[in-house]
Amino acid sequence: MKNLAMAVVLKESRVLVQYRYRSEKGMVYEFPGGSINNGESSENAAKRELFEETGVGAEGLIATAQYSSTNEYGGFISHVILTAKKSVKPVVTNSVRNQTFYWFQTKEIPLSDFYPADIEFIETQLINHL
């Protein structure tokens, strides 16, 4: 069982998506995020993962909503919506990931690369925030 938190960062009617390398899948589009540590809240995990993957710190963000569902690993996935100040800009934090960052409108998100739980969230919840 694996519990996950995803940082869904919104800025100026767009959502942050990273294009990055994953050893098991190659290059994929995804939200910054990852595993929740023992005793860690979903919001704190999302903010930690966001910082680790993009260099974006919590000081430029406001948590506005959270949605949880079951993931394909038998655990839960929490999508934490974070509204970003205009000055927030992600940076490459690990050259092995071969990251590129995009600010997409909902209709521009390349759904085919996302995991099923992310697609469900995008199609049923994210559209209400952009």
Image (spheres, rainbow, N blue to C red):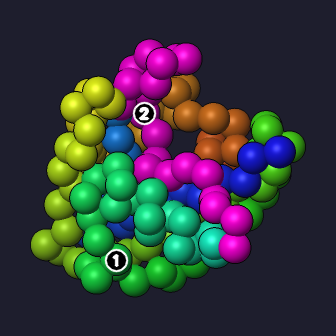
Image check: 47 left or right of 100?
A: right
- Measure the alpha-carbon separation of dots 2 and 1: 22 Å
Q: Which residues, given as a range, are shown in magenta?
A: 20-39
Disc on res. 29: 2
Circle 2: residue type:
Tyr
Name the amino acid type tagged 1: Ala
Going from N to C along the chain, the mark reached first, 2 or 1, is 2
Looking at the picture, does residue 110 appear above or below residue 74? above
Quadrant of the image for the C terminus? bottom left
Q: Residue at x 62, y 45 (%)?
A: 118
Instruction: Using residue 53 as the reference point, say whether residue 30 is left or right of it.
Output: right
- Residue 21 shown left or right of residue 36 in the figure: left
Residue placed most toward the observer, 5 or 115 = 5
Mark 1 is surrounded, within 10 Å at the Cα level, by few (under 14), some (14 to 19) or many (20 or more) other residues, namely some
Q: Secondary structure at mark 2?
A: strand
Foreground residue, 57 or 109?
57
Crowd tier of the residue under label 2, counting other residues whose Cα lies within 10 Å: few below 14, some 14–19, many 20 or above: many
From this view, report whether residue 97 is shown above or below residue 108: above
Q: How far across and down, in percent of the image, does residue 105 sit? A: 35, 51
Residue 8 in sight: no
- What is the quadrant of residue 47 in the picture? bottom left
Q: Disc 2, disc 1: CB below 8 Å?
A: no
Q: Quadrant of the N terminus?
A: top right
Q: Where does label 1 land, which residue?
A: 58
Q: At 61% from the left edge and 52% from the top edge, which residue is drawn?
A: 35
Viewer can see residue 18: yes
Q: Picture coordinates of residue 75 (x, y %)?
A: 81, 50
